[in-house]
Image: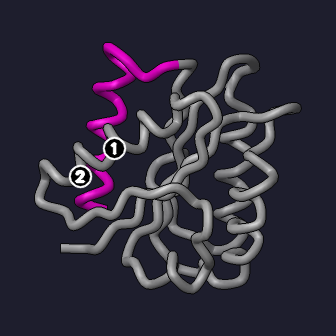
Amino acid sequence: MAKILVAFWSGTGNTEKMAELIRDGAVEKGAEVECRSVSGLDAEAALAYDVIALGSPSMGQEVIEEGEVEPLVEALSGKLKDRKVALFGSYGWGDGEWMRNWAGRMRGYGAVLLDDGLAVHETPDGDSADQCKAFGAKLAAF
């Protein structure tokens, strides 16, 4: 089974909770998963995994987090051709435009995306928590 990295940045804890639920869903399907903050993660370390799942909340004008996630995405940009990538994150306003833009950007880098990413409004609970676990299960089979 594939080795999966679930790497995230979280300001309020919502995206971190998503990461944990996604990890749990993948582990339940037998996947080997490392779940960690993007802090200190470099592109080469991320590329050591078969599947890379990146999480960022929507920030400012519906963009990914610019201090740690954006630099990692930029460092990965020329190295993602035919790589399996999944995107996830939470948002508090807007309509998820940041996720659509991020998914399009990653496809432009040549990444093979799992769905169109997973965007959850605010805290993942109830149905949205179930969606996170299901996303993790799909990640394990990706």
Q: Position of residue 102 (x, y in %)?
A: 70, 50
Q: CA distance from mark 1 to mark 2?
A: 6 Å
- Assign a secondary structure to mark 2: helix
Q: Kindly check if marks 1 and 2 are in contact, taking CB atoms under 8 A apart as contact.
A: yes
User: Residue shown at 68%/41% (left/top)?
Assistant: 100
- Is residue 54 toward the left or the right of residue 63 in the image? left
Question: With respect to residue 49, does 119 lie above or below?
Answer: above
Classed neighbour count for the residue bearing mark 2: other residues with Cα under 10 Å, few (<14), some (14–19), many (≥20): many
Which residue is painted at 45% across and 70% down in the image?
A: 84
Towards the viewer: 40 or 138: 40
Residue in view at x 76 percent, y 59 percent: 70
Magenta residues span 123-142
**In the rendered view, does 142 fall on the left or right side of 39?**
left
Q: Amino acid at mark 2?
A: Ala
Depicted 136 relative to depicted 123: above or below: below
Q: Which quadrant of the figure has residue 92?
A: top right
Q: Is residue 111 above or below residue 60?
A: below
Does dot 1 land on a helix, a strand or a loop?
A: helix
Q: Position of residue 81 (x, y in %)?
A: 60, 81
Name the residue carrying label 2.
26
Q: Which mark identifies residue 22?
A: 1
> Residue 14 — which label?
none
Magenta span: helix, strand or loop, mainly? helix
Relative horizontal placement of residue 111, taking residue 64 as reference (left or right): left
Q: Is residue 61 above or below residue 71?
A: above
